[in-house]
Amino acid sequence: MSAKIAHFFLVERNKSTAPDTYGAQLPLQRIAPFYDALNRDCRFAKLVLPEATVLCFSFFKRPFVCDLVVVIRDANHHTKKVMEREVRTLAAKTLHVAESALVHEEYHHRVLWLSQGVQQHEFDNLLKLFSGEDLRSAETPPRRDFGRYWMMHHPEGLVFAGREESEFVRVLAMYALALAYHFQISQLVNRLATLSETGGDQLMAARQDCGRFRSLYFFLNPIRPAYKTLHAAYGFIAQDLEMAALENELLHKDQAISDLAQIRLARSSLPSADSGRWGSAEEKAGAERLVADRQLAPRADKPVIWPKRLLRVGFWLLLLGMAVLALEVPTQEYLPMLDKGLSQLGEWFKPLQRFATSLVGS
């Protein structure tokens, strides 16, 4: 039974110099046909030790540098916990760092390599050693065939079955890049959420970094489409890491911050509490004038008719006065007075008419 297990560790850059002065430096394009931006700014190193083979991947440039160390050891009969402890100690010793530099347990993924065919019971035993649990064959996920090898998703990471070590290393490189993508995008999402309330230059710098990373380094599939088998293999790897959903989370977070900025800008243009609900001093003054005009203007459904009634009442009071005068004054004196009063009647009504007209005009 020939099987190996590759253990991934995400390394804190400020606690390790790997892979700058580590192992044999090899061009990344010799491993996998990535796009030029990745080939230019990513590095690969390999170190062969008696007890293990150590691969080191350094992806991207500052401030997005992400280092991953992969320790490949034979699958033995130790338990999963003992194997992980031994591998962690070996990785820290190889890098000349403390084990505290190997952080981010959520990125401690593993890949099981089957370099030759095995019987079903041997496969079940290897899966038990790999996961630390008794996983029945009926519960294993379906395999995906890629010609000279096949792969299978697993809760611990991935199962790879193929004879060529070069193909296994190529799959490890693609898996490491997917983990680097996952880590960086998660960091950017968390950074945006943290700074969304702070705002200012720090938030703008974070949004700029998001744009830089997505435009320069992030590809939904970093394998050139001409390499169909490898292109499909990376898609299979990224599917289990839910890379598309994570990128959507980053896009939604950035859009939410844009929406929040628009709301804050609109709110900042509103007046203070003492200026009411109007958007500007001019609008408020115009509204106040409109209210004043509506209060002073007569209502169209109730026309002003009482000045005309006043004229009629005045006329009848005048006639009543003349009748009373006729009863009190002798006829020979009353008639001349009546002629004189009738001749001056128009002059008497002019002041009252002007008063009534002014009321109607107001």
Image (cartoon, rainbow, N blue to C red):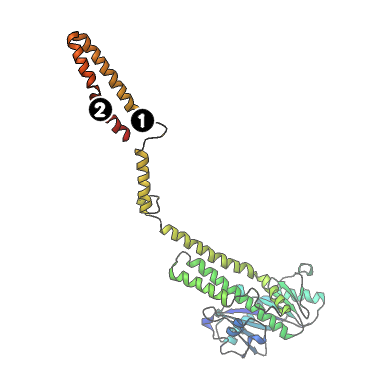
Q: Amino acid at mark 1?
A: Val
Number of the label disc, if any, that sits on residue 351: none
Per the model, the C-alpha gap separating discs 1 and 2 is 20 Å
Label count reads 2
Find numbered disc 1 in the image and state the secondary structure of the residue it sits on: loop
Q: Quadrant of the C terminus?
A: top left
Q: Position of residue 264 (x, y in %)?
A: 45, 60
Q: Name the residue: 44% across, 61% down.
A: 265
Q: Give the x, y percent position of residue 177.
A: 63, 78
Q: Nearer the viewer, residue 173 or 247?
A: 247
* Occupied quadrant, residue 61: bottom right
Does residue 36 appear in this view? yes
**Residues packed near mark 1 inside 10 Å, few (<14), some (14 to 19) or many (20 plus):** few
Decide: is 355 above or below 50. Answer: above
Mark 1 highlights which residue? Answer: 304
- State the residue position of label 2: 350
Picture coordinates of residue 95, whole percent (x, y): 58, 86
Q: Could you tell me the amino acid type at mark 2?
A: Lys
Vertical placement of residue 353 versus 201, above or below: above
Closer to the chain start, of discs 1 and 2, is 1
User: In screen coordinates, is 275 left or right of 195?
Assistant: left
